[in-house]
Image (spheres, coloured by chain):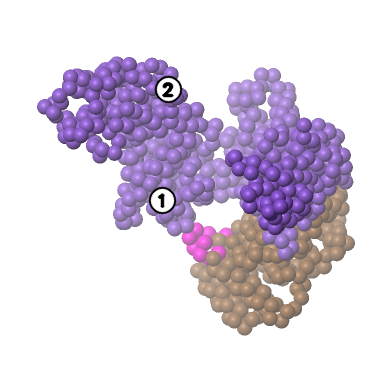
Chain colours: A purple, B brown
Amino acid sequence: MAEKKNFLLEIGTEELPPAFIRPALEQLRGWAEETYPGAGCRTLSTPRRLVLFLEGLPVRREETVFGPPLDRARDKDGGWNRQAIGFARSRGKRAADLEVARKKGREYCALTIRRETAEELPGEVSALLGRISFPKSMRWLSGDPFRFGRPIRWLLCLFGSEVIPVEAAGLRAGRETRGLRFFAPGSRQVRRADLGEFKRLLRENFVIADPAARRKKIEGGILRQLRRRRPGARPEEIDPELLDEVTGLVEYPRVIRGGFDPEFLSLPAEIPVTVMKVYQRYFPVFREDGGLAPEFLLVANGPFRKTAAIRKNNERVLRARLADAGFFWREDQSRPLADRVEDLEGMVFHRGLGTYLAKTRRLVPLAGRIARLLGASAGGVKTAERAARLSRADLTTAMVREFTDLQGVVGREYARLQGEGEGVALALREQYLPRRSGDGPPESLPGVALALADRLDTLAAFFRAGFSPSGSQDPYGLRRQAGGVVRIIIERGLNLSLPELVGEAVSGLNLSSGESGEGGGEILDFIRTRLEAYLEGRGFPVDTVRAVFASGWDRLPAALDRIETLERMRGSRELLAAATIIERTANIVRGSGLSGEEEWRGDSADHPAETKLARALAERGEEIRRLIGEGEYRKATVEYARIFSRRLSEFFDRVLVNVEDEKQRKNRMILLKQINRVYTDSLADLSLLQFERGEHILE
Amino acid sequence: MMDFQTLIITLEDYWRGRGCLLVQPYDLEVGAGTFAPATFFSVLGPGPVRTAYVQPARRPADGRYGENPNRLHQHHQYQVILKPGPADVQDVYLESLGALGIDPELHDLRFVEDDWESPTLGASGLGWEVWCDGLEITQYTYFQQMGGFELDPVPVELTYGLERIAMFLQGVENVFDLEWAPGVSYGALRKRPEYEFSRYSFEEVPAGEYPGLFRRFEQECLSLQKQGLVYPAYDFVLKCSHIFNLLDARGAVSVSERAHYIARVRKLARGCARIYLGEKEERGKPDG
């Protein structure tokens, strides 16, 4: 057994933004798995440290390096020649170290090179630190272009009990770590690379280094507080995103309860809730009946013995924020939303893409058309158009200027106050849904119409201007926009045609700009990639999705239905049989250039198996197409397999397709292509399904 | 209890003890301590800098006629520039809070991500708001750019919000109730100016004439730049910036004009930075 030791790396930083931590840990882990496969890998993190622990790294690795082939490495006396000795020297070895090794049946002059892990690590780790990328990185060293998410202030790097003197970011790694600021001043020596010991040492110094443990502690603390008021409080009530964020803001959490003046409960609940969550990172507290309680929970960082001052001061901050919100609330009423629309002329939607007023003017007809496509009444269409007209007016309010996250909420609440219909008010909020993965799509029809119109218009405008995303780069968040379109249509089960919608958005843009531009195809392809990602995320295998999409995907609910049907039929004899039919008919026709639109000529057919097959197609083909058209995908598949499986098998057994006579060959191919198309035209191209080997059958 | 002037003296004393050159507030209207020449010019170029000063900062749009307990047309910042930022800058900063009597075992001190950008100065940096019990008391920033130029060495800027810190220390909820000195309230000194300046910026600013003033100051800046008089030229950057802030508060600037004004000021600031750096290269003067 090769000797092994553990490895521990701690990158000590000034406070990293919570969102930076996970991607950085993933890169550390990726490096470890690539460089030292087989070593157990663990990561830890707090706002002030990224930790990588590897268990059982080999102390050295032996590697055979091949030199010249033996027949060119010997001199005439059988000793090593100059070439061989040169090879040894180039590797820092002598002739005596040379040996003979075999590779692919041939003998070579070779060397065994030992690589000492401890010698490799400094260079490896230093290169690794320079490679970690962040959403945003910074410089802080003089005359050194080194960048990191935030300044690195200490490095700990141990291999067994030995320090690996990594040099990076103007620092040299040692064995010192640090505890929680103020409560554990100075540094602490770490004896050796031992995860349990390291965690215990940090724990004694008020750092819970494992983010999962920290999250759990916060969750537990919040739940205890909630249950003091309401014993039935459940963990699901705690906003998971806020919990993640707060976990990334503290090393040693302590949950503290505070309160605010109930007078602020007269504001719509979402306003104080957003102020608390987004601007102060407090957890709001809800009453039994779902209403907001005038309380909040904050997570402080440290083992405070006295918390009264912290509570009181936080309460004061929140009071000032809520007083501001109350002030804006009153002040904004001096001008109704409807009067603010024209102010949008001065607000640029995006550089080079015009103003929000221009966007608003495109949204009105687009939202109206989508509402009509959704079957809205005349009133519903009007509501959607009115909501589109007011859709961005809240951007000009003092409330949204101060609390940008309230966009949409403010629109809805002001619309209600100003006597716009409830439908308009709801749509103003719903246009931004779904905002994150936990949100549902809009509920109301005008909300759906506006949400779709806005996203499609944004996509059309960005693609028109040439800002389409490439690779991993998506600076304008267009993936999210396209993903929103997909989620709304699928999750609301809307029978809308995507090409039609995209076409409407593109032509609306053309109309307003006076230009004519295409680009709808590119947008559709882009939406399709988001669609595939979404469906994969829901657990549908890629091959099923692709098979179905190959037969058209413009009506998403139907496409989803087809995918689900095929998934349910996975492993069934019928699906296998149908797939075999599709695959074999496709294979043989491939490259012939035939579309199946050509006429199959009965008078050229001279074999009964062929005529039989053609008759089955003529008699039953339409029936199968009808079943597909009615959404009876399972029945259609079963029927397709039943009609063609045996007949096709017989045909292939008895009839040679690739005959000399071109006319006859083509005629047979036309027939096969037509059979293929009965199914693949609008259900799925089953030849794209991946089956286990040997699964194909024809009865 | 620490009154407002003692707060200032304590910070002055603390940073003097940390090797800072104490300079005086700049005598033109600025929107933040960053705009004062002691920051704008000192962060450019290679030489080391340690400097600190109080800077009254004017934000006409934030005026509330002296009626809002938290908002002021003019507040005070304590500005510290350390170039290059020392490795223990966080500790040195936190010690300054200790000097103010903020006990870190009784208060929740936090560094919360907040990157900073000033489109008018062509400046940007990465950093944090420092929170004390949920209250933002300081901006802590590693400048990356100023006047459009990448900075090396990288300066650290610490901007203390003095009114907020004083309210925190004195436990008052209304800024006008602060004690400036024993027996003298902040309100006694500042309430009337707050009211008058709010009237001025919201009601009296001659919206028709000031755009012309902006243009004249802009011209002046450009012609001073041509003569290489970079400090006087920069004064006119500040004047332009202030005129723009007044027009903005008056509601006389549409949002598209807004972007246009900001771009014009930025162009002037970049010109000053360029000339300042170029001049230094020619004469090979040490920075300072």
Chain ID for label 2?
Answer: A
Magenta stretch, main secondary structure, is helix
Q: Position of residue B12 (x, y in %)?
A: 84, 62
How crowded is the residue under tag 1: few (<14 C-alpha within 10 Å), some, or many (20+)? some
Label 2, secondary structure: give it: loop
- Against A225, residue B247 (above or below) is below
Tag 1 residue: A463
Q: Quadrant of the N terminus of chain A?
A: top right
Inspect the magenta stretch and tell me whether residue B151 lies in it. no
Q: Position of residue A683 (x, y in %)?
A: 33, 27
Q: Magenta segment range?
A: B249-262
Q: Looking at the picture, tell me which residue is in the foreground, A274 or A200.
A: A200
> Where, by quadrant of the figure, is residue B106 drawn?
top right
Q: Amino acid at mark 2?
A: Gly
Q: Is residue A241 left or right of residue B140?
A: left
The residue at the point 49 percent across, 29 percent down is A538
Q: Looking at the picture, tell me which residue is in the foreground, A155 or A644.
A: A644
> Where, by quadrant of the figure, is residue A684 drawn?
top left
Q: Position of residue A336 (x, y in %)?
A: 46, 46
Tag 2 residue: A694
Q: Looking at the picture, tell me which residue is in the foreground, A641 or A460.
A: A641
Q: Is residue A156 left or right of residue A510?
A: right
> Where, by quadrant of the figure, is residue A286 drawn?
top right
- Against A242, residue A686 (above or below) is above
The residue at the point 67 percent across, 42 percent down is A101
In the rendered structure, are the residues bearing label 2 and label 1 in contact, judged by CB atoms less than 8 Å apart? no
Q: Position of residue A633 (x, y in %)?
A: 33, 21
Q: Is residue A330 left or right of residue A368?
A: right
Label 1, secondary structure: give it: helix
